[in-house]
Every structure is written in structure tokens, then in C-alpha cells.
Amino acid sequence: MVVAQLAHRLTAHLNWAGLGEFALLFVPVWWAWTNEVYYTTRFDSDDDRVKRLFGAAQLLALVGVAAAIGQGVEGHAADLFAACYALIRTVQLLELVRAGRFVPEATTFTGYFVQGHSVGLSLWWVSLVLPDAWKPWVWTVGLALEIGTSLRAGRLYEQFPPHVAHLPERFGLFVLLVLGESFTGAAHGLLDSRLDPAALGLTALCVLLAVGVWWTYFDRLDDDAVRALARRGRSRPYLIWLYVHLPLTLTITSLGVAVSLVQVRATEGHFAPVAWLLGGSLALYLLCESVVCATGVGARQPTLAFTWGVRTRLLTVPVLALLPLVTRQPAPLVGWCAALIWLIALGDWFLEAQGQGGRETVPPQDT
């Protein structure tokens, strides 16, 4: 719901200001979701009824966040957005306080995050009484303080790591949610095009592109970075893996917006902004995804499929970023994007099939 509202907002305001607003609103949404994942992968219990009440409060606040984004986050909507986000984060900090009480060995861990995040969170509550022009700046500082607190907690992550299997699973779920915008956008574009043969072909290319993105990500979603934290006490690959998911999911969402506009803008003749959004989003996605691959390389003795996967992704990034200079026709542009993403996906599959899980004769990289 919230991701859909963010996508709709960017669709209606496809310009530099709209992109900036989209990023500003996406970050706190991702951050609130991530912190709930932090909690559930460490402390969640099926028998905790108080936790269910806290979860219900967060869901109600999420409805307010979605409503505020739909109204454009201006005036009263900005206050609604800030209040609902602050409420979500306040409830999450209360969850950590309870966890520290019931799990004594986690007291140092929970106390650090409650104290550090409270400083940034307080700025969101303060923003409710500030002029509208100040609010985005105060929100940005608050988020920076919260994220900075987490980035400085490397030793605590090593002492109290998250669940190895559940964390990648939860992040993969969020990727699926934002990737759904691409499939929804392709369907909407097809409906708006009156189902003529050219539109059907263009929609097929858009779906092929979205499936290629899905394939490349989930073919490389593993727990090596999280496992390195849990078993070897190495926090750097884990932190890189974790925080690169912010720009990765943001670019997948913007890619969904581009896909939804391909048919409409192709008909209207104003395709240049969509072309740059499509090529740029896919290029940034592959850049982030190459970092995800690299954390797997850095956390273990790498396979050829992983090291070669990093190289092919990095080589494809500038090609996709500059592709709108070569062609801005919808079908050729989407076709080339789909072809490049599928070359990477099939290359990964071929190397893994050929290698049978074999390792390169190179030493593990110490990050």
C-alpha cells in the first residue's frame, strides 16, 4: 500500500523535484520496515500478545503514512506523515525496551539502539511544530542520526547477530513487494493502450524485463554476509549487504514507475524522461546488486559464478545508463534492457551449472 502510493506519486511528478521527494519519503518507509525486521529476527515470539498490539498500532500508523503520501505530503499531510512515522518508530523503540527487560543478555544491545535512535526520532516529533519549509531538512537530519547510530554498532551486531536464515528471507520479501510495482505497471500500461498488437509486444518486453530483475536478484540472494557475522564476527560484509538494499529497493520501485509509463508516454510522444528513468533505474539496480554479490564474495571463498557475476554487472551499468542516448524509442529501449538483464541472468545460471558449486583457486578476501 505505502510502496504503491510512493510509485503513484512519482508517476504523477516525473521530474527532478519529484525524484527528490520520492527518495525523501522512501527512506523513512524502508527504515521503519527494516527496524521491525531487526526486532522480529531477534526477539519475536508467537505467544507475545503485547507485541501483537504493538504491531496493530504500527499498521494503523502505516495507513496514515500511505494517506499522507497520497495527498502529496504538503501542509497537514506533511504533519500526518511525520506523526505516523514517529509513532511507528516510537512503538518499535518500546519493543526494544521490552526485549531488554525480558532478555537480560541483550540489555547492552537494546539500550544502545534505544538511546541512539531516540535522538533522531525526537526531531520527527519536533518537526510537527516547525514551518513546512524546515520539515524535510529536519527529517533528513533525524534519519541520518538514526542510520549513523546503526552503522556505528558493528561490535554489537557481532555479539548479538540476527537470525541467519530469516533476515535474507525478509529482505527478499520486501524486494518482491517493490518488484510487484513493475508487473502492476505493465498491466496498467497494457489496459491504457487498448490492447493493440504493438502494445501487447511492448508489454511482453516489460514483463520480460521485470522477470529478469527478479531472476538476477533471487539468484544471488544468499546468507553469506549474515552468516559471516554470526559465525566469524565480521560485521562489514553484513552492514554493506544490509544498507545497499535501501538504494536497491528504491531503484526497483522507480523501475516499476518507468514500466508503468512506457505505454502512456509512448503514445503521448513525451518519452525522454521515461527513457532516462528506465535506463538509470536499471543501471543503479545492477550497481547495487553487484554489491550484494560482492558481499558474498567477501564473506567466503568465492565461486566463479559470483566473481564473474560482479564483473558482468559492473560492465553493464554504464551501457544501461547511456542507452537512452542511443535510442529513445520505447520498444527498442525496453528490448535492449531486457536482453542485457537476461544475458546476466543466463550467464549466472550457465556458470553455476558448469561449475557444480566449484570454487575458484583464489584465497578468501578479508573485508
Image: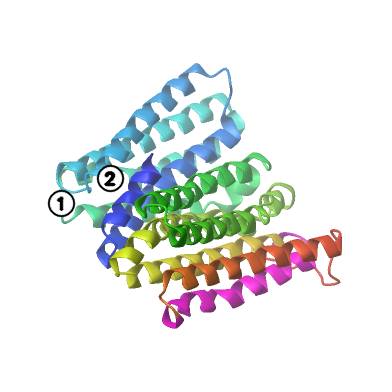
What residue would you read off at disc 2?
A: 69
Res. 235 image quadrant: bottom right
What residue would you read off at disc 1?
A: 132
Q: Is residue 307 above or below residue 178?
A: below
Residue 321 is inside the magenta segment: yes
Name which residue lies at 69% across and 60% down. Answer: 296
Q: Is residue 155 visible?
A: yes
Name the amino acid, label 2: Ile
Instruction: Please state the horizontal and vertical placement of residue 181, each as a whole percent of the image.
Output: 44, 49
Residue 91 is inside the magenta segment: no
Q: Which badge, 1 or 2, is on the more N-terminal residue?
A: 2
Q: Nearer the viewer, mark 1 or mark 2?
A: 2
Name the amino acid, label 1: Asp
Which stretch is magenta? Answer: 298-326
Furthest-front residue in view?
197
Q: Is residue 302 visible?
A: no
